[in-house]
Every structure is written in C-alpha cells, then in structure tokens.
C-alpha cells in the first residue's frame, strides 16, 4: 500500500486531507514545517522538521516507508538559520534551493518539488488525494455574474493573464473596472483586508486562479469560509474561481456563508 507524507504548513488543509485519507483507508503521516502550525482539532500525530535539516527529514520519511508526498497549508519563505544546517543538507539540498530564493514563488516551489523527487519521493497534488476539493463549473451560490460584475470579471481575468507569466499573484479584486488590489506575498487575507479598509463603494468581484503554467501539485489556490467573510466585509458582490484550478475547503460551510451574505460564487471555465 502507498504511504503518503503530508508536508503541513499553516491552516486547515492538512487536517482536511488527513481526515479524507483516513476515511479512504489510506496510510499517511504528517510532517509539520517548524514555525507553521496547522489547525489540528483532532489531535492528529504530527512530527515537526526544520527546512535547514531537509536531508534528515528525507531519511526519516524513508524509514517510515513513505512513497509519495503531498504539500498542504500555507508556508511563507523561511529565514534560514545557518547554525542549524546539517552537513548533508548543506551538500545535497541547499545548493539546489538557495539560488531559487532570489526568484519568484513558482520557481522556488518547482525547485522544492524537484528536490523531493531527486530523493525518490513522488509528489502529488492535494486535489489528487481528495478530488472533491475542485468544484465543477457553474454556480456554488447565486448565478453567473452579469452586467457590471461580468465586466469586472473580464477585466480581472485580463490582469491575471498578464501577471501570471511574471510569477505574480493568484487573485485580484476589480470593481467598476478598476483594479483595487492584487494578491502578492502577504496572501489573500491581507489583500481582502486592504480592500475592506481602503474602499468606499460597494460591488466588484474577487477572482482567484492559478498562475499560467503553474505546477498544480503545490500551492494550488484555495478558498474557505473565512474568505467568504472577508469578501463580504470588503463589500464585494461575489467570488469567481477558475474551474479545475482552485480548491474549496469545507464546501458546505462556504456555501452557507455565501448564501447568508448574499454573495455569489461562480466557477468559471478557464
């Protein structure tokens, strides 16, 4: 039987994957990146590791019988502590990764995948482990964007198509044809908080999609109930997700929150 390592960052996705895999009878273990605590209401067993000692993690995973890896949860770029780097990591891992710290997120994440694969671990996406995380095209709540919302959607898609090749952004907010915010390193929450604090009007759309050419096995965009609450606080009309490219976590809670707030959620074909 295949045994999967969940490489866990912050948030609820690692535990969600663990529950789904447990229900499927799949064998797994959770390895938590030091400094990024996952939500763990079920008290699942978690083993912490340091980026500075990745080679030691690979040894432990081999001892644990790990065959494949799935990345789940939010992780920002770490500040590496040179004093904590072990010799094997310094020789075998960091020469591949350190040059990529000067590039965009997608380049760095591709490098991370390559390192895990070099140590003979198959890397799969969260949506491969739990396919139901990706909603089908159509309405999750409300109806298709029309009128001003449809025009804002078209503008947002144009912006994302331009930014993707530059390895920037997985989300954008557009209202009345104006770009109010673009998702950058601080993430979706910071972007929507900025919109809520700085805008004066109502309406507009939040559009989320993977970057063009992004390796979808890692850092696939996602929304959850908190995202819906933030969109409502920002005075936006709705959310548009790219079909096959954005995960919806806790879908029932997302739909309930959106319906309560009067927000549409539309899943758009690429």
Image: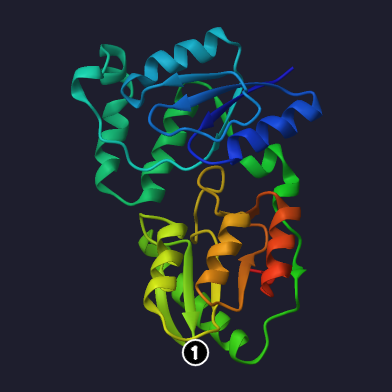
Provide residue 103's location: percent of width, then percent of height.
Answer: 29, 49
Q: Viewed as shown, does residue 219 lie left or right of 50? A: right
Asked where in the image residue 41 lies, by quadrant, the reply is top right
Q: Viewed as shown, does residue 147 lie left or right of 46? A: right
Q: Could you say which is closer to the camera, residue 251 or residue 118? A: 251
Q: Could you say which is closer to the camera, residue 83 or residue 65? A: 83
Q: Residue at 49% of width from left, 53% of height from top?
A: 214
Name the residue furthest right: 24
Name the residue furthest left: 83
Q: Viewed as shown, does residue 150 lie left or right of 197? A: right
Residue 207 in sight from this viewpoint? no
Q: Residue at 56% of width from left, 43% of height from top?
A: 217
Q: Secondary structure at mark 1?
A: loop
Asked where in the image residue 101 lies, by quadrant, the reply is top left
Residue of label 1? 176
Is residue 265 shown above or below 48? Answer: below
Question: 10 Å neighbourhood of mark 1: few (<14), some, or many (≥20)?
Answer: some
Provide residue 115's location: percent of width, then percent of height.
Answer: 42, 29
Q: Residue at 52% of width from left, 84% of height from top?
A: 202
Is residue 16 shown above or below 172? Answer: above
Provide residue 229's location: percent of width, then percent of height.
Answer: 58, 63
């Amino acid at each position: 039987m295949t045994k999967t390592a969940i490489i866990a960052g912050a948030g609820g996705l690692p535990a969600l994957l663990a529950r789904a895999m447990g229900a499927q009878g799949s064998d797994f273990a959770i390895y938590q990146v030091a400094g990024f605590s996952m939500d763990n209401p079920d008290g699942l067993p978690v083993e912490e590791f340091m980026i500075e000692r990745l080679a030691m993690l690979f040894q432990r995973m081999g001892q644990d019988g790990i065959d494949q890896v799935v990345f789940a949860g939010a992780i920002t770029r770490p500040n590496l502590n040179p004093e904590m780097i072990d010799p094997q990591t310094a020789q075998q891992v960091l020469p591949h990764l350190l040059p990529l710290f000067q590039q965009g997120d997608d380049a760095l994440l591709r490098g991370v995948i390559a390192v895990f694969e070099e140590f003979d671990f198959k890397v799969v996406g969260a949506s491969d482990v739990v396919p139901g995380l990706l909603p089908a095209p159509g309405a999750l709540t409300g109806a298709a964007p029309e009128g001003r919302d449809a025009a804002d959607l078209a503008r947002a898609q144009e912006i994302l198509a331009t930014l993707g090749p530059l390895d920037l952004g997985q989300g954008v907010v557009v209202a009345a044809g104006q770009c109010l915010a673009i998702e950058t390193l601080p993430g979706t929450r910071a972007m929507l908080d900025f919109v809520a604090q700085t805008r004066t009007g109502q309406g507009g759309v939040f559009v989320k999609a993977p970057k063009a050419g992004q390796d979808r096995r890692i850092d696939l965009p996602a929304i959850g109930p908190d995202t819906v609450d933030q969109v409502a606080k920002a005075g936006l009309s709705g959310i548009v997700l790219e079909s096959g490219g954005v995960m919806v976590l806790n879908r029932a809670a997302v739909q309930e929150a959106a319906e309560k707030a009067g927000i549409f959620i539309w899943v758009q074909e690429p």
